[in-house]
Image (cartoon, grey):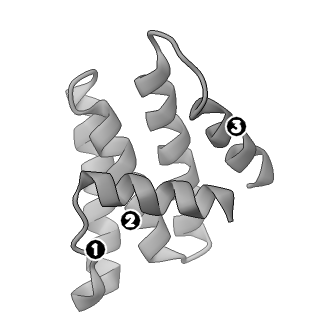
């Protein structure tokens, strides 16, 4: 997880054509690890970030990430956060830096 976190943080300062794709992949992989650790709210945030990063560049990947986020929402029940896209980014970045 340490390597994933460091890599994802490095992507926040990168530039380039594949940046959104790569940020989406990092968020997805982090979501998978967090889900396996049963850290469902943070996993939901990571999956939502992947969904948002891929909305325009890869709709099928975005839909797959959305399905993973829905799976976390079921586990969270009535505790599902109501964050907009900007808040999801802030929460994800705060988690990365913690």
Instruction: Write the residue at 45% across / 63% down.
Output: 91
Dot 1 or dot 2, earlier in sequence? 2
Quadrant assignment for the C terminus: bottom right
Position above or below: 83 against 62: below
Position above or below: 9 against 38: above
Query: What percent of the width, then of the height, locates residue 30?
Result: 57, 52
Give the number of callouts: 3
Q: Look at the image and tell me whether residue 47 can be seen.
A: yes
Q: Nearer the viewer, residue 75 or 8?
A: 8
Query: Which quadrant holds residue 71?
Result: bottom left
1 and 2 marks in contact (CB < 8 Å):
yes
Query: Which quadrant holds residue 6?
Result: top right
Q: CA distance from mark 1 to mark 2?
A: 7 Å
2 and 3 marks in contact (CB < 8 Å):
no
Read off the residue under disc 3: 7
Q: Is residue 68 left or right of residue 70?
A: right
Instruction: Write the residue at 37% across / 48% down.
Output: 49
- Foreground mark, 2 or 3, reads 3
Q: Is residue 76 left or right of residue 82?
A: right
Q: Look at the image and tell me whether residue 68 can be seen.
A: no
Q: Secondary structure at mark 1?
A: helix
- Foreground mark, 1 or 3, reads 3
Instruction: Write the residue at 34% across / 81% down.
Output: 75
Q: CA distance from mark 1 to mark 3?
A: 26 Å
Q: Secondary structure at mark 2?
A: helix
Read off the residue under disc 2: 44
Query: What percent of the width, then of the height, locates residue 76?
Result: 33, 83
Read off the residue under disc 1: 73
């Amino acid at each position: 997880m340490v390597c994933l976190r460091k890599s994802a943080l490095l992507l926040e300062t990168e530039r380039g054509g594949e940046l959104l794709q790569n940020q989406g992949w990092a968020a997805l992989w982090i979501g998978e690890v967090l889900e396996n650790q049963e850290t469902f709210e943070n996993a939901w945030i990571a999956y939502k970030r992947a969904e948002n990063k891929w909305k325009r560049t890869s709709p099928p990947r975005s839909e797959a990430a959305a399905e993973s986020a829905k799976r976390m929402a079921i586990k969270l029940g009535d505790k599902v956060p109501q964050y907009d896209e900007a808040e999801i980014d802030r929460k994800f970045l705060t988690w990365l830096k913690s």
